[in-house]
Image (spheres, rainbow, N blue to C red):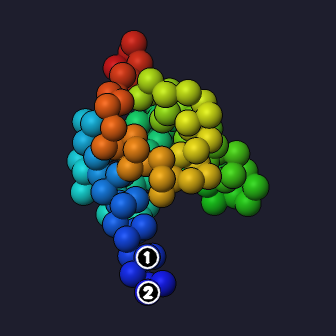
C-alpha cells in the first residue's frame, strides 16, 4: 500500500511539472529527465544555467531551491509564499500550478 501511495505522489509531481513546463513553452517531457528538468526550471525562473553548479553545493542548494521556487511562482503570477510551497511541498504545489488557472507571464524581456 505504501508503494502505491509513493507511486501516486511521483506521478502527480511529474504530471504537474509536465504541465508547468508546457505552460512556460518548454517541452513537457523534460520533466522526466533528471538534470535537464533542473535546467528547464532555471530557464523558466529566468536564472542562468550555471546556477546548476550552485545546486551541488550543500546549504547553498537550499537557498537556490527557494530562490528558484519563488521566481517560478512570480512568473506564473503567484505569491512568494506559493514559491515557498513549491520548494517545500512541491508534490502538492506543482500539480496546483500545472493544472490550475495560472498562466506563464515571463518577463518584459521575453
Task: Check contact, mark 2 vs mark 1: CB within 8 A.
Answer: yes
In this rendering, is residue 1 above or below 11?
A: below
Mark 2 Cα shell of 10 Å, populated few (<14), some (14-19), many (≥20): few
User: Residue 54 got which mark?
Assistant: none
Which residue is pictured at 41% across the width and 36% down the height?
44
SS assignment at label 1: helix
Left or right: residue 63 compared with residue 38? right
SS assignment at label 2: loop
Q: Quadrant of the C terminus?
A: top left
Tell me if I can see residue 26 in this picture. no
Residue 75 x/y as whole percent: 44, 27
Q: Which residue is mark 1?
A: 5
Q: Quadrant of residue 20?
A: top left
Q: Which residue is mark 2?
A: 1
Disc tally is 2
Tell me if I can see residue 29 in this picture. yes
Which residue is pictured at 48% across the width and 47% down the height?
93
Amino acid at each position: 500500500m505504501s508503494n502505491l501511495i509513493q507511486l501516486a505522489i511521483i506521478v502527480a509531481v511529474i504530471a504537474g511539472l509536465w504541465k508547468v513546463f508546457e505552460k512556460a513553452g518548454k517541452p513537457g517531457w523534460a520533466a522526466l529527465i533528471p538534470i535537464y528538468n533542473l535546467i528547464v526550471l532555471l530557464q523558466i525562473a529566468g536564472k542562468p544555467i550555471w546556477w546548476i553548479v550552485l545546486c551541488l553545493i550543500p546549504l547553498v542548494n537550499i537557498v537556490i531551491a527557494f530562490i528558484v521556487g519563488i521566481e517560478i511562482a512570480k512568473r506564473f503570477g503567484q505569491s512568494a509564499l506559493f514559491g515557498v510551497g513549491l520548494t517545500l511541498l512541491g508534490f502538492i504545489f506543482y500539480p496546483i500550478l500545472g493544472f490550475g488557472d495560472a498562466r506563464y507571464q515571463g518577463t518584459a524581456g521575453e
